[in-house]
Image (spheres, rainbow, N blue to C red):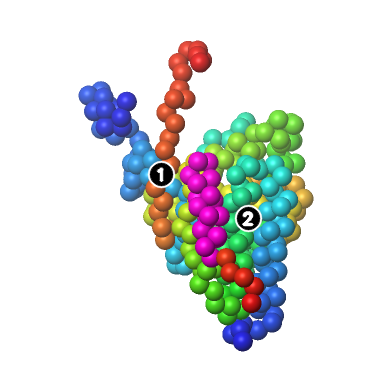
Amino acid sequence: MTISVIYNVCARLGHERVFGGNDSELDVWEAIQGRRSIRSFKPDPIPDDLIRKLILEAGIWAPTGGNAQTWRFVVVTDPSVIHRIKMVAPGILGNPPAVIAICQDLDEAERKGSKLGREVITLMDTALAAQNIMLAAHDQGLGTCVIASFHAGAVQQILHLPPPIVPQLLMSLGYPQIKPQAPKRNSKVVWFNEYSQ
Amino acid sequence: MSTHNKDELEQEFFELTCYMVTSARNLIPENKLYGPFRLVDAVSRLIDVLQKLDLKSPRLEAIQKQIEEDKYTVMESEEKFTAFLENLVMSLVPLMQDPK
């Protein structure tokens, strides 16, 4: 079913708008499908307040396993610190004016969610928060790229993170220089009621 | 002579070293296509450093241009990325020269 068909169905059912916040520029479908992983950024700085908004009004509103909320966000805008992080983060491509280290307090996660919380749920929570931030950033005209290719121990040292605070994802953030084409999606991935070959 | 001083060049090489060493460590558990991607990306970065040394080389610039144009095919498909690498290798042959 295409998005326009979904809209038509929703309209018939009396729903003017399926999703969307009050001051949102983009429809949620447009945000989801229009977001790209950006690896080439303009040098323009991003206001701190905007980055704070992305985290506090999008990131931390993601669902979190057992309401643990053990995520920690370290925003890096100092070019010299970004420079050092890039040296141990091969996945950061281009020159983003900001990088968000999405971290987890693993000790707190274990206290709240046992071994599963520490080893599995934190990773899911980090990813969920990251997606919220990326969609909100896209809504604000910003590009993002989420990065797992980095050395966590080295990033910990550079950011002076105490031992239980572990970076799980980095996110580069900036105004896009180039917006790539969307890779093709494989649509043969959905089953109802039971899986079949 | 280079317009960059020795310290600046040492820093450039240090950064490239960090990139390659961290890549080596991280590639152990990563997507196998990231290995060739990091290698060609490192080549492009190396050519950047050489340009800062004022080592003008049209053939190296041509190689870098190809890399920068198509390296992200790694995100699209293995087939496209492999074809890009294949073409890159084949484009080296006509650029070969005997050492002076």
Report x, y in % for residue A95.
53, 63
Mark 1 lies on a secondary structure that is loop
Residue under the point 60% across and 73% down: B50
Report x, y in % for residue A80.
62, 69
* Residue B29 horizontal side relative to residue B67, left or right: right
Report x, y in % for residue A179.
40, 54
Residue under the point 38% across and 40% down: A33
Report x, y in % for residue A61.
51, 41
A97 or A185, which is in the foreground? A185
Q: Are marks 2 and 1 on the same chain?
A: no
Amino acid on which the number 2 mark rests in the picture: Leu
Residue under the point 72% across and 44% down: B28
A119 or B16, which is in the foreground? B16
Q: Is B3 located above or below residue A62 in the figure?
A: below
Residue tagged 1: A182
State the residue lying farthest toward the bottom: B1
Q: CA distance from mark 2 to mark 1?
A: 25 Å
Q: Badge 2: how crowded within 10 Å, few (<14), some, or many (20+)?
A: some
State the residue lying farthest toward the front: B98
Mark 2 lies on a secondary structure that is helix
Say which chain tag 1 marks. A
- Of discs 2 and 1, which sits in the foreground? 2
Say which chain tag 2 marks. B
Q: Are marks 2 and 1 in contact (CB under 8 Å)?
A: no
Start and end of the magenta stretch? B78-95
Disc on res. B39: 2
Q: Quadrant of residue A42?
A: bottom left
A53 or B81, which is in the foreground? B81
Name the dominant secondary structure of the magenta segment.
helix
Does residue A94 appear in the picture of this structure?
Answer: no
Amino acid on which the number 1 mark rests in the picture: Ala
Q: Badge 1: how crowded within 10 Å, few (<14), some, or many (20+)?
A: few
